[in-house]
Image (cartoon, rainbow, N blue to C red):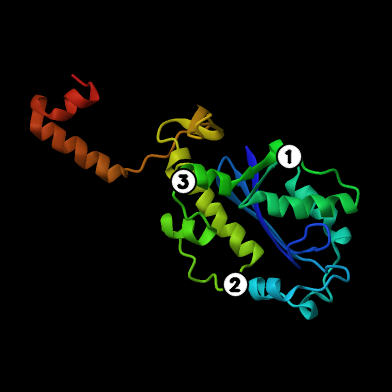
Amino acid sequence: MREIVFDTETTGLDNQADRIIEIGCVELENQFPTGRSLHLYINPDGRKVHPDALAVHGITDAFLADKPVFAEVAEEIAAFFEGAHYVAHNASFDMGFLNTEYQRVGIPAVAPELVIDTLSLARRRHPMGPNSLDALCRRYGIDNAHRTKHGALLDAELLTDVYIEMLGGRQAALGLSNKDTATVERTENEEVTIIGERPRPLPPRLTEIELEAHAALIERIGKDALWHKVSGEN
């Protein structure tokens, strides 16, 4: 399953009057980052950054003056998300802004079933909270010391790590047998289930020298070697 973990920064809190000024996106395939990301600053097309918002993200009107307006990057953003689920923390905020921006340029709103809210997921996992992104980073031991101000791509990268941990951690989807991580499903309880066969077996980790040394040891021990019982050899 393809997912895009994303975050936005805006000129203010009103998704009808205010505008997106930064978007950061991280692509996941089956809960693993692919290495693809999208990061854009966007000119708010005449809307000024509210002082309260400026205090949060530090993005000034002067910095945004030469950036493209949303209409110029809308297709690039929509293409990056195409075929994926939208993953955001407090998703109603980000999706409210993104859907409004989409509608301004004639792109259909995103269907609610394509949206995953990590804040709702965190509240079910940790009902006593707190469940802010910073709090979840502390809970899962994710280093966010470099997060002095909000930034869309940085927050999307941190949220990616948090999201993976909330789904059971990176180990949950590794498949330590000949299983393929190409298909990973969440059950109703949001546990991770791995199905499908791995197309290629994992490479052996033992060297030829180690294998030869092991064989020599077993030969010295003889028929009483425990290895014969464990391996099924007679």
Q: Which mark's residue is nearer the viewer, 1 or 3?
A: 3
User: Vertical placement of 37 versus 208: above or below?
Assistant: below
Q: Which mark is residue 127?
A: 3
Confirm whether residue 197 shows in the render.
no
Name the residue at 44% across, 35% down.
175
Confirm whether residue 138 shows in the render.
yes
Amino acid type of disc 3? Answer: Pro
Q: Which mark's residue is nearer the viewer, 2 or 3?
A: 3
Q: CA gap, disc 1 to disc 3?
A: 32 Å
Q: Identify which residue, 209 or 85, lies in the foreground.
A: 85
Q: Which mark is residue 83?
A: 1
Name the residue at 51% across, 46% down.
123
Q: CA gap, disc 2 to disc 3?
A: 27 Å
Q: Which mark is residue 149?
A: 2
Left or right position of 193 against 59: left
Q: Quadrant of the N terminus?
A: top right
Left or right position of 195 against 149: left
Chain-order first, disc 1 or disc 3 = 1
Q: Position of residue 5 (x, y in %)?
A: 63, 51
Q: Which of the 4 quarters of the picture holds residue 215?
A: top left
Amino acid type of disc 2? Answer: Lys
User: Vertical placement of 201 versus 37: above or below?
Assistant: above
User: Vertical placement of 69 versus 126: above or below?
Assistant: below
- Residue reaching furthest top? 234
Q: Quadrant of the C terminus?
A: top left
Q: Identify which residue, 193 or 9, lies in the foreground.
A: 9
Q: Position of residue 59 (x, y in %)?
A: 71, 74
Task: Describe the element under mark 3 as helix, strand or loop.
Answer: loop
